[in-house]
Amino acid sequence: MIDRRTKQYAAWLILAITGLLTPLIAWKVQVALNSNSNDVRDWLPAQYPETAEYKEFFRRFGSEDFVAASWPGCTLDDPLLDRFAERLRTPARQRLIRHVSTGTELARALQEAPLSLSHDAAIGRLKGSIVGSDERATCAVITLTDEGHHYLAAPLAEIREAAKEAGLPAGSLKLGGPPVVNAAINQESSQSLVRLAMLAMGIGLVIAWWCFRDMQLTLMVLAVGLFSATASLAVVTLCGVPLNAILITMAPLVYVSGMSGGIHLLNYYLDAVKEGTLDPVQHAVKHAMLPLALAAGTTAIGLMSLEFADLLPIREFGRFSAIGIVISVIVQFTLLPAYLTLWPPRLKHGSSREGDKSNSLDRSVDSAIRQFATWVIFRRNWFTALFVLLMVVGSYGLARVQTSIEIIRLFSPRTPVLADYAFLEQQLGGLVPMEVILRFDNSSPHSIGSRLALMSAIQSDLHTLPSVSGSLSAATFAPPVSGRIRSLTGITLHRRLAKSGYLMVEDKAEYWRISVRVRAEDIDYDLFHEQLAQKIAPEIAAAGMAQEVTTSYTGTVPIIYKARRSLLQGMILGFGTDVLLLVVAAVFATRHWSNGVLLLLGSMFPMVIVFGWMGLAGIVVDVGSVMTPCVALGVTVDDVIHFILWFRRGISSGHRVDDAVLLAYDGCARAMYQSWGVIGLGLSAFALSSFVPTFRFGALMIALLTVGLAGNLIFLPALLSGPLGQWIARAVRRQHPTVDVPEHKSLN
């Protein structure tokens, strides 16, 4: 038996280590938030054909990303446009900005020798991409260096500063393009997490105080969740991994897990104090060890199974969430016991504390819980039938769930980037790049003029598609096929077109690029791909080049579509493996299949109901929704395992099934609704975010935890008081376990 002084020394040592780690953790958390990066093209694994095609495209042509900059009144004859471009080309900005071109400059170049196009012909080639449909509105097109792509906030700040130097009115500059959207995602996701995390903690603090009515206990359990979450973010930084919109939800998951376990442990401690146990801290740790370790261990293993997911952010979410879960368990069984050892709450041992208003409220709540439990048990058959029916309907809706990773969907209508995009698409056209690559063998007998004619014909056909506003290719910057081109040698023309960035000549082939501008809308890529093929294939056949041309498609559009499919697969894989491992662990730990069935139903119920409703209502699953089932599962599983173990203890101590259910209510119900209040209502603060993934995360968390609470306080007890509970009771009695059941109030 360890004496009290030794325990106090150990507790001070734990707190000293925690204090030393806190500054390092705070620093690494700040680094992690600044590293937020959300380029979907980096999410797909190398073995995907889409990834390989994009890498080949990038090797030949470089990044297709561009920043489109315009403003009201930005036209081909606007002198501000020339001054703006000059400011962007200063040597100080070349570290972040690779190239700048304007609609005015491109139109002028097309009209000058050697092309010598007419004004109308030049504008026609640029319409829908760099020049608007009114043939006057235009923009500056800015490409970034590799360093600029890595730190998006810096080049965008330089672009805005250049606009200010050129004399543009404040607030008039409109920016669009993939780098602008990615930078907005990085900023919105980080800011919303930090800003609303403080509100979430504040709400959790108030509710925890209301539950425990002791500020000391409230701060203890909050410290457990907060330290676990921040330490987990610090681990991400230490491993050199940047955050993204999916991985960032790891922090709330660990916070939820730490808070939930801490609340259960604290309730064991308070029960032990009220019962007069000599060492309530040791008693609490002893009784909480099995359920918390079982829930955390199986959840962590289930999260590690996400290593088999396709999307890199989902794999990282699983990897670091598993590490975070382990950290939260360590914190629960070290930091919280250390607090309780050094600063135990002022409660009277073995006393009912008659006359204490706080205790009077406790007794009222306990009485209400007991009445509710009796009401549920008496109507168990009706509740079982109702909840099973709800799961059947939810399963039908679950099969209809749709996913979306459309970038524009991530922002609320009030976000400035949406207003900028709407302006630019109305003035100029689509801003999402889609690349069509035509590969010609060097053995092709067709002349360069024939190939340019093919490019021009394909572009004309593609412009008839509703989602396409315009396109650029080598034909855009070449002389007319019927005129000047005949006087140029093949070598000279190749060199000129290669400088345009739309033709790449390699040893055995030529690669001709058509950069299609697609509007920022959630298109069906399968249908769009088919439409592109139906436009391109006939033109190739008509030119007699079907045997010598190979067509491929790459860019942002196909990668986003592939990532969307992987998103749903990742959600199913993550939640499914978590539940499966939990069920298997429960069966092995209790040595009876019926416990696995209970855990399966209790864990699946919230996800089936909430996501089934989303499927029936047509609400899409986005990057803010995809990991919420795994986050909510931590709380739900904690509650289910505790309830089942309390029920088994009741049976093993000789109680009837209904009395064992009441014992489980007495032992768990308080911690269940406290977890719902502190965690669910606390995280619901994220629903106030203007960043849609953060909003969805907060809304879904409160929905999942509310449905989970209803399932654990109604569906689970109804099942336990019915035939399934009878089977479990018979199995427990056959096993004759030696379970230490704490003294408890009479069940009569």
Image (cartoon, helix red, strand yellow):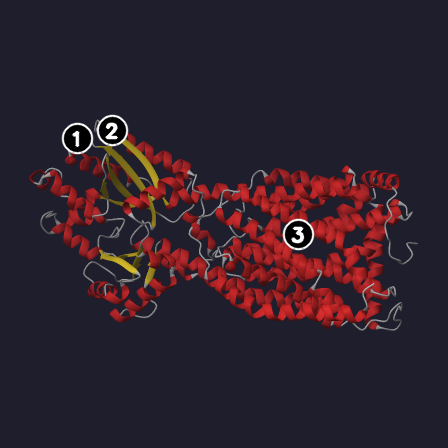
Say if residue 595 shows up in the picture: yes
Secondary structure at numbered mark 2: loop
Side of 619 relative to 292 (left or right): left
The image's mark for residue 330 is none
Q: Amino acid at mark 1?
A: His
> Residue 558: which quarter of the image?
top left
> Which of disc 2 and disc 1 is earlier in sequence?
1
Front residue of 273/662: it is 273
Q: Residue at x 86, y 64 (%)?
A: 277
Q: Whole-percent x and y of residue 611?
A: 60, 45
Q: Quadrant of the C terminus?
A: bottom right
- Report crowding for label 2: few under 14, some 14 to 19, many 20 or more residues within 10 A (C-alpha): some
The image's mark for residue 634 is 3
Q: Any mark on residue 446, and which? A: 1
Q: Position of residue 167 (x, y in %)?
A: 26, 71
At horizontal 31% and vertical 57% (from top left) the residue drawn is: 144
Callout 1: helix, strand or loop? loop
Q: Which residue is mark 2?
A: 548
Q: Report the Cα–Cα distance between label 1 and label 2.
A: 10 Å
Looking at the picture, tell me which residue is in the foreground, 92 or 462. 92
Amino acid type, mark 3 = Gly
Percent x, y for residue 655? 90, 48
Circle 3 SS class: helix
Indicate the quadrant where residue 672 lies: bottom right
Q: Residue at x 27, y 57 (%)?
A: 98
In percent of width and height, residue 487 lies at 6, 40
Query: Which residue occupies the foreground of this view, 324 or 136?
Result: 324
Q: Residues within 10 Å of mark 3 (few under 14, many from 20)?
A: many
